[in-house]
Amino acid sequence: MQIKVGFQELVRRAEAVIGTISATEALAAANDEQTVFVDLRDIRELQREGKIPGAKHVPRGMLEFWIDPGSPYHKPLFSEPKRFIFYCNLGWRSALAAQVAQEMGLENLCHIDGGFEAWKEAGGEVEQKPAK
């Protein structure tokens, strides 16, 4: 199978149109009550590695449905006038997700360059998620 566009090109295109912040900038926003960290990683990643304290887990496959007020799965969180900081493990999924969310009309959002790994490397606190 010949791929027309690879994931790296898709991420590059997404990052050209969305906001990207460093892990240090994300750390500075950690205690801001008007900021919501959105963890897009798989539940197994959260259970294994923890998450940014207070982050909301949004399964990547449900993001569009949770954002859209017309969806039966809509989450009111996404209708609040908050700043949304998306992240995943390395920043690839979060870049793509932020691009889609922006296209859907979600305002005031960005993603963390380097994702959760960069957060930890910058000294960010990690909240352990209990296994179910």
Image (tube, helix red, strand yellow):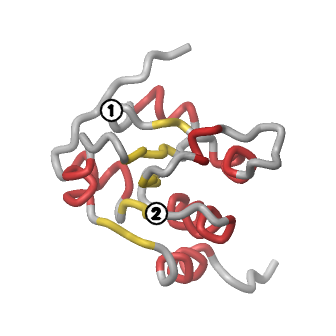
Q: Residue furthest left?
A: 123
**What residue is at 59 percent from the left and 61 percent from the top?**
106
Image quadrant holding the C terminus, namely top right
Q: Which residue is mark 2?
A: 108
Left or right of 68: which side holds 118? left
- Horizontal and vertical percent position of residue 120: 25, 46
**What residue is at 68 percent from the left and 65 percent from the top?**
104
Task: Classify 10 Å Cα crowding around label 2: few (below 14), some (14-19), many (20 and above).
Answer: some
Q: Which mark is residue 119?
A: none
Identified by mark 2, the residue type is Asn
Q: Which residue is mark 1?
A: 53
Picture quadrant where residue 9 is located: bottom right
Picture quadrant where residue 52 is located: top left
Image quadrant holding the N terminus, namely bottom right
Q: Is residue 26 above or below residue 13?
A: above
- Horizontal and vertical percent position of residue 63: 66, 49
Q: Is residue 33 above or below residue 96?
A: above
Alpha carbon separation for disc pair 1 and 2 = 20 Å
- Horizontal and vertical percent position of residue 36: 42, 44
**What residue is at 37 percent from the left and 60 percent from the top?**
112
Q: Earlier in the sequence, mark 1 or mark 2?
A: 1
Q: Secondary structure at mark 1?
A: loop
Q: Secondary structure at mark 2?
A: loop
Out of 120 and 67, give the one closest to the viewer.
67
Q: Residue furthest front?
A: 81
Out of 36 and 97, give the one closest to the viewer.
36
Q: Is residue 75 above or below residue 11?
A: above
Out of 43 and 71, give the one closest to the viewer.
71
Q: Nearer the viewer, mark 1 or mark 2?
A: 2
